[in-house]
Structure formats: structure tokens, C-alpha cells
Image (tube, grey):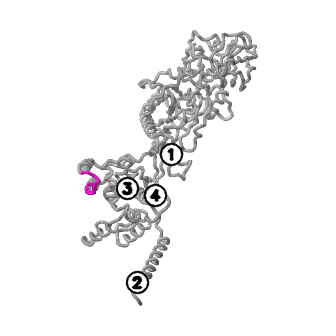
Amino acid sequence: MTRLRKLVIGAAALFGATSATALGLLQLDRAFPPPLPEKLVVSTEVVDRDGALLRAFATPDGRWRLAANLDQVDPQFVEMLIAYEDKRFHEHSGVDPLALLRAAGQFAGNGRIVSGGSTLSMQLARLIEPRAGRSIASKLRQIARAVQIERRLTKREILERYLTLAPYGGNLEGVRAASLAYFGKEPKRLTVSEAALLVALPQLPEKRRPDRHPKAAHAARDRVLSRMVAAGLLGDREAARAALEEPPRRRLALPALAAHAADAALRAAPEKTRHQLTVKKSVQQGLEAVARDAAAKLGPRISVAMVLADARTGEILGEVGSADYFDASRSGWIDMTNTRRSPGSTLKPFIYGLAFEQGLVAQETLIEDRPADFAGYRPKNFDMSYQGDVSVRQALQLSLNVPAVRLLDAVGPARLVARFRRAGVTPELPPGETPGLAIGLGGVGVSLRDLVQLYTGLANGGRAKHLRNGTGAGEPPSAEGVILEAQAAWQVTDILAGVRPPEGAAPRGIAYKTGTSYGYRDAWSIGHDGRHILGVWVGRPDSGSVPGLSGYVSAAPVLFEGFAKSGLAAVPLPRAPAGVFHAKREDLPVTLERFGPGGDGAVAAISEPAPQIVFPPDGARVELGAATAEATPLVLKLQGGRAPFRWLANGKPLTETVRRRTATWQPDGTGYSTLTVIDAAGRAASVRVFVE
């Protein structure tokens, strides 16, 4: 046999053996794959609008294991980790032969395992398949698994899984949980000292825990710093400065903000591991601190709930369901933002808004605050006293009950409830009852969240936005309903902006209203600036009476403190829209000088029927060429009523009082307008038309 032939046969045999070995290894790899699930079992996270962690939930086995993303981890920490644990990480395929040779030499020289020569891939193999002890067999198994892992995952994926599973002492796993527990922050920006400690901990996590073994943690951190100097990643001075920092001596609790909203998010989508709310973390922290401090001052068993929303979008920026979620004495687990309670006087602004909208009153119109009987219903003021003749502005600012009921009797309780429903809020009435006058004084059930949703209409030109917080239970961002016309909403806001702040509170430039339910069970305060609405509820979750509880004394200070601690910049209140009628008392037309002709609050008997506008009909579209110079006036006709009559367009008087049942109106532009006529008895009728 020639030499060439022998070489060919030998090469063929070697190729065959190599191929058979490779095929065998490939089949073995397929037969015994590493336990690499597509997704790791991690803690469920609830994050804010910017991705900041609000609350985390432990895994089923009780571990705090937060998923790591390299983009959210300090790059210097990653460099230090690789330099310390596996400096040829990016070059090898799971096993570093030089590191293994070094480990073997140390074993031969010392008679024991000094260092294992493990790569990060081998350490990941040990984390996903824990071993009972250190032995040659377990090391060989790690080597095989590391090679398998490198075939299946990219280097980035290997790092992210390691940083998710690495142990950091106790039930902390992963760099995020460790950074939050030891430093109170995400690992996106770490000091050199913090990064070095996090590099050192996974090697001996229990023996180096800084909260239990500070000296060992200190020494391990310093060894990492020395290695970084030797590797050229740190200068001597930088390492020396880092060595002066003391490692943390205690373990912090992971964030537990927005507990009730977090629970709601989990109930809505239990299969998800990451839930994003519209809440802003800094706002939430401020509100929770205010609620906790306020409840402590107010006394035992009293809780506080708060909702802060963006009136333009309907997004909830902060919501506190109770003063302390974990305080059983205050029933902290009950979410009082969604519990229906009596709102006291907080619905009165919408009664006044409807009266402004229908042209029944102006801010300086006089209205009687005297004892009155409305078919057997006799409302009384909170302090059991009466003011006599007051302006409408004073009546709302002082929250007088009798004037509010007089106006509600005129505009109609059913119409008020219809506006609430248009804004997406359905008040809860006693079973079998229809809307009555008691609604104006809190005789209906609404939640704090409902109330904030209604008040978005005052800050948003009459358009109430449906609230949402990202849990999946809210309305879409575009959902809204008109609760008042823009001019009426501004009139109400202008009055509420003049209510004096509670004692000791700094002026904030907000319009706000307070309320107290019957029996001193609920205290409310709700206010807004030009963009943000904050609602506050104070009381006992079990509906128990609290002597001395009131909206102005108990809830209003919390409102002002909540705005101050929210960290949100104050937004000026909206300017008056076009067409607003806002006259001094001496300039009011005769029909707006006083509301109602009677002296006892009841309208005197009138033989004529109430006025009714017969043209144009309600909802009509009228083509007048209003956008041109040749626009024609619109003829207005009515039936019934007692002369003289006062006509108003969008709350602004058209002419002096007239005795005829016809009038003309020259629109100043296209769009929707409200036409109102008021007769000598104070009775009114309105229609809404669209002018083209």
C-alpha cells in the first residue's frame, strides 16, 4: 500500500470518526437539552407611566426575582462583572480553557478547589440546574450545559438571564431586586462602590449580605475594586474614593405604591407579568405620604382616599385607596376611591351650572336663603342658620342648602342626573326612587372617582373626560361627555375660585368645593386648577359617624397639601370663553335681579302656563348665512308665560324686556347656541340650536 493511499485512508477514518463523534454529540444534545424555558418565572411588576416600578409581587416560591434588561443596567457594572467573573466572555463558546487550566493548577497545588474557572455561561447553567455540591462530575456537567446554552442563546440573552437569576442573599434574586433592596434604586445608575458590591455578592450571597455581615461585604467589595484597578477599568484614586463608602447596613422593602390599582391590574390580566398604569410615581409617592400623615392626625379608624387626574386626557396620575393598605384598624384593604358614598354638597356646582346655562340667574342675582317648603321637603343649612337675601355667588361659596334646592327645583333633578349620565357617571339612587330634590344635598350615592370624573368638566370647558388608570377597567382615552356648556362651566369655576383656603393653607390658585354627608360620615373636598383635578375623601370605611368631621375642616387641608406634595406645577385657571355674561348687580336686567318672586321660597300661583319656545324647536339646524356679511336674523317665538319677557343667547341678554311673544336674534357666528326666555314669574324655557 502506497504512502499516499495510507494517508487518504487515515484522513477518511479520522473524518468519519470526527463526524460520528459530532453526530453523536448533536444527538446527545438534542436528547438531553438544558432546562431553558422561553420565559423565566419572574416577579409580576406594576410600573408607572414612565416605566418606574410601583409595586412588585413575589414569585410563587417566595422569591423577589425581577426581570433584567441590559439597557436598564449600568454599563460600568456589566463591564466590572465580566472583568471579574469571565474576562473572555465575548470570545469563548461557553468554556474558557485558560480559566480551567488555572483552576486545575490551583487544585493540584492546594489539594482543594480554590476557584472553579467557571464562565458566566457555566454559572448560568448552575443557576438553572442547581447542584448538590462542588465536584469534578458536577463541573463536567456544567461545562456540557454551558456549551449547550451558548448554542441556544446570544451573549446578551445569557447576561440578562444571569442578571435575573443570580442570588444576592435571602430571597433576593437578580441585580434589580438587589439594587432596590440595598440601595433603594434601579441599577441603571450605580456608584462605583455599589457596582463593586453587586459584583461580589453572588459568589457567597449569604456570607456577604451587607445587612447581616457588613465586614464580609466590605472586604469582598474592596477585593473587586482592587481587581478592577489591576484590569485597568478603574484608576487608583477612583477605587480609593469608592472604598471610603460604607456598604448599606439594612435591607429596604421593595416599592409597594398604588396598592389598590396594582391589585385591580392583576385581577384584570392575571396572565401578564408587567402592568403599566397611567400613574406618575412621584405624584403617587406624594399623595400617599399626605394621606398617611393626615389619617394619623385625624384619629384612629379614619381613612383617607385621593384621586388626582389630568382633566384634558382623563388619565389618573395618582390614586390612594386608603391611608395605609396594610393597616387593618383603618380597613386599609378597602379601596375607597370606588366605594359609593353620599357626596354631601359637592354636587351643588352642577346645579348652579345648569341654572347659568338656562339663563335663570347671574352671579350677582339675589336669591333667598330662608326656611322653605318644597312639597313637604324642608331643607336646612348645615349650621341651622339662614342668611336672608344673598347673591348666587355667595350662596355657592357659602354652600347654602336652601338656595341650591330652589335652583334644583327650577332646573329639575331629572335633568341634573341626565347630565351626570352624559358625563359617564350614573348616581346610585335608593331602590325604586326617581331623582328628587335631595340629590342637591347628597341624597345619592357616588364614588370619589365618579366625582373627579364629573369635575373634569369644570376644568375642561364643560367636557367631562372618562377616567382611566391603565388597569383595563377604564374608558378609552377619547371618551368624554358634555356636562355643561363652556360659559356655564366657567361661571361655576369663577365662583369656586373665590372660596377662601382652609386655615394655614397657602393659596394655590384653585377652584374647589367641600361637602359633608349626613351624620358626619363622609368629608369631601375636590378642586382643580387649569388642568389637574384632585378629589379627597375622609371618613370611616365602615360608614361610622365621626363627630366634628366636615369637608372644610377635615378634607380641604388634605386637598391643598395634596396639590403641594404632588410635585405638579400649578396651571392657571381657564379664561372666560366668548359670550360669557358677567355683569355687576347694578347692571343686571330686571329679570335677573332676583330669582323667584315669592318671599317664602315658593313660586306664587300663576294662572298663565309656563313659557315655551315654539320656534326654533330644540335641536334644530338653522341656515342663516351667519358666516357672511348678509346674515339674516332669526325670529324667535314663544307661547305661554307672563309678560314681560327677557331673551338670552348663551346666557347673554339680547334686548331689554319685551311684552311681545316674538323677538329677533342676530347670531355672531356659526355653531351651537342656547336660547333662553324668562318670564316675569322667573320661569324659563330653553332650546339648543345649530346655526349654519
For the C terminus, give its image quadrant: top right
User: What is the three-letter code of the residue carrying label 1?
Assistant: Gln
User: What is the three-letter code of the residue carrying label 2?
Assistant: Leu
Q: Which residue is mark 3?
A: 170
Element class at badge 2 = helix
Question: In the rendered view, would you say 600 is above or below 143?
Answer: above
Between disc 4 and disc 1, the foreground one is: 1
Q: Which residue is mark 4?
A: 61
**Residue drawn at the location 53% of the way across and 48% of the way down:** 266
Q: Quadrant of residue 493?
A: top right
- Density class for disc 4 (Cα within 10 Å; few <14, some 14-19, many ≥20) is few
- Density class for disc 2 (Cα within 10 Å; few <14, some 14-19, many ≥20) is few
Question: Residues under labels 1 and 2: Cα distance?
Answer: 68 Å
Q: Which residue is mark 2?
A: 7
Percent position of residue 220, x then y: 28, 56
Q: Is residue 233 magenta?
A: yes
Looking at marks 3 and 1 on the same chain, the residue that comes earlier in the sequence is marked by 3
**Residue 299 appearing in the image:** no
Percent position of residue 547, x then y: 49, 29
- Density class for disc 3 (Cα within 10 Å; few <14, some 14-19, many ≥20) is few
**Residue 669 appearing in the image:** yes
Between disc 3 and disc 1, the foreground one is: 1
Between disc 1 and disc 2, the foreground one is: 2
Q: Which residue is mark 1?
A: 276
